[in-house]
């Protein structure tokens, strides 16, 4: 639709090919504040980001688990199928000068008890836990960044609905005006005061206005459907916008002040995680100290099944300390450290590039805020003047002062001015949506 190309672009850049009907009842939106409130509460994608924050918190607790001891219970039974022999001096069994081979032990051995272990020193696990903690902040920053995007989308669809609704009303007035001209020509043709060519021109003009109205209505239906999507409303639930946009009074509530772009807040968290990941790889060379203890009972016997009578079990306990230091890992650790360092450098460069891009975008948004408002003021005045000329042309045509061609030319000029002003409004409110998302 030529009249609303810019508005259509705003709708189509996120959701395309969706159609719907205007619903009554259900959710009523009296302002953009209402729309944002519903979107922040119901949007399913925002709920996914909130769940990601909860997941990051759970992952951090998991990463911190190395600080706590682990306790496990175990019970084992062993059948010594062939007991090994041990060479001993013959003097032990009154066979001096000989070597005697004796078997020590029982056919069956049973153990049961608790194993307790605790990591005393593990710098790699510590760095990984710090990275997991920073990931909570990263998930929250990503959620905040999406809220900014959601606000912008919601505002764009909301304002598109308002402008489309205003366009439908203007089209209704245009259609009434075009219809009155057709009736006037038909009356004159019946009186023999004009020809069929004039009637055909009036009918062509009427059909063009009717086409514009139908396209405006289609855009309104689609934009309402797209707004319902970002609001997280089911298709069966109605959506009504009670606010009306004034084509001649607009932008008074636009405050061209931009807060920090939430998308930039993601990069510092990513950089911190990259630093901790690099430290984690470097700490692979650090020693790890583990304390291990076993507290249980042991039984030796000649029967397949253990006995639980008094005195059949003996204490079996020990405590140990393990220190491990990697010496050579086939250069894999060295390459992992190098890769982690490059990843950190990439994140740093991405952050710098994003800052420059954000600064440029902010300058453009602020410049447009002033320019579009000035443009709309001029196009609104032009729209008024062309409408006045169209009304005067209609009077002159009805009085027979000018021909139908002269009047239709003034009507087409009016429609062109209407098209220009509506497009300018769509640009103004699209830019306002960006500003609103940053406040």
Image (spheres, helix red, strand yellow):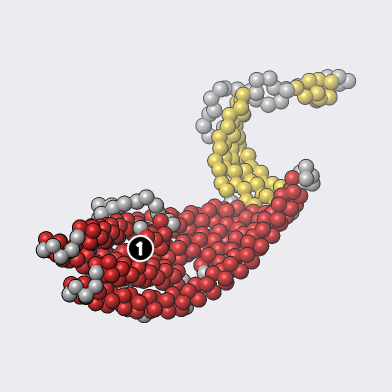
Secondary structure state at the residue bearing disc 1: helix
Give the image location of residue 434, x and y in percent.
45, 69
Identify the residue at image location x=52%, y=69%. Answer: 261
Q: Nearer the viewer, residue 415 or 424?
A: 415
Between 208 and 310, the one nearer to me in the picture: 208
Q: Which one is nearer the viewer's eye here, 188 or 241?
A: 188
In the picture of the structure, the residue carrying the numbered disc 1 is: 3
User: Could you say where residue 99 lies in the image, as x and y percent from the top left?
Assistant: 84, 20
Query: Is the residue 332 above or below the residue 201 in the image?
Result: above
Q: Residue at x 11, y 63 (%)?
A: 191
- The answer to which quarter of the image holds residue 430 is bottom left
- 401 to 313, vertically: above or below: below
Q: Position of residue 96 (x, y in %)?
A: 86, 21
- Quadrant placement of the C terminus: bottom left
In the rendered image, the residue lying farthest to the left is 191
10 Å neighbourhood of mark 1: few (<14), some, or many (≥20)? many
Q: Is residue 344 left or right of residue 63?
A: right
Quadrant hosting residue 21: bottom left
- Report the label total: 1
Specify whether 39 is left or right of 334.
left
Asked if residue 127 shows in the view, the reply is no
Q: Residue at x 78, y 45 (%)?
A: 331
Q: Residue 179 location in percent, x, y?
A: 19, 63
Tell me if I can see residue 198 in this picture: yes
């Amino acid at each position: 639709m030529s009249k609303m190309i810019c508005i259509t672009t705003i709708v189509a850049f996120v959701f395309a090919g969706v159609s719907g009907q205007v619903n009554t009842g259900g959710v009523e939106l009296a302002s953009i504040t209402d729309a944002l409130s519903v979107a922040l509460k119901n949007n399913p994608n925002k709920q996914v980001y909130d769940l990601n924050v909860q997941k990051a918190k759970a992952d951090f607790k998991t990463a911190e688990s190395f600080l706590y001891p682990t306790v496990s219970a175990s019970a084992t039974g062993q059948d010594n199928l062939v007991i090994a022999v041990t060479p001993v001096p013959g003097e032990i069994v009154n066979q001096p000068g000989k070597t005697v081979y004796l078997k020590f032990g029982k056919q069956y051995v049973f153990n049961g008890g608790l194993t307790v272990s605790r990591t005393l020193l593990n710098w790699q696990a510590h760095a990984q836990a710090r990275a997991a903690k920073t990931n909570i902040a990263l998930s929250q920053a990503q959620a905040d960044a999406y809220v900014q995007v959601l606000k912008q989308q919601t505002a764009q669809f909301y304002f598109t609905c308002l402008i489309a609704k205003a366009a439908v009303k203007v089209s209704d007035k245009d259609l009434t005006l075009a219809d009155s001209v057709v009736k006037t020509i038909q009356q004159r043709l019946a009186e023999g005061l004009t020809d069929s060519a004039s009637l055909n021109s009036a009918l062509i003009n009427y059909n063009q206005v009717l086409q514009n109205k139908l396209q405006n209505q289609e855009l309104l239906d689609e934009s309402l459907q797209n707004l319902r999507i970002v609001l997280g409303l089911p298709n069966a639930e109605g959506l009504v916008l009670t606010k009306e946009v004034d084509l001649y009074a607009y932008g008074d509530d636009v405050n061209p002040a931009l807060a920090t772009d939430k998308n930039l807040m993601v990069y510092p968290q990513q950089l911190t995680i990259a630093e901790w990941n690099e430290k984690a790889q470097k700490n692979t060379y650090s020693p790890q100290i583990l304390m291990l203890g076993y507290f249980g009972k042991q039984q030796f016997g000649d029967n397949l099944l253990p006995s639980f009578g008094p005195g059949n079990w003996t204490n079996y306990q020990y405590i140990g300390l393990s220190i491990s230091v990697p010496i050579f890992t086939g250069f894999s650790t060295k390459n992992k450290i190098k890769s982690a360092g490059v990843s950190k450098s990439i994140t740093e460069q991405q952050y710098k590039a994003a800052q420059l891009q954000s600064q440029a975008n902010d300058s453009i948004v602020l410049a447009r805020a002033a320019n579009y408002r000035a443009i709309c003021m001029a196009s609104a005045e032009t729209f008024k003047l062309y409408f006045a000329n169209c009304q005067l042309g209609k009077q002159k045509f009805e009085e027979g002062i000018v021909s139908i061609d002269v009047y239709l030319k003034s009507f087409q000029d009016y429609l062109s001015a209407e098209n220009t002003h509506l497009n300018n409004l769509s640009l103004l409110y699209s830019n306002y949506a960006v500003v609103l998302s940053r406040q």
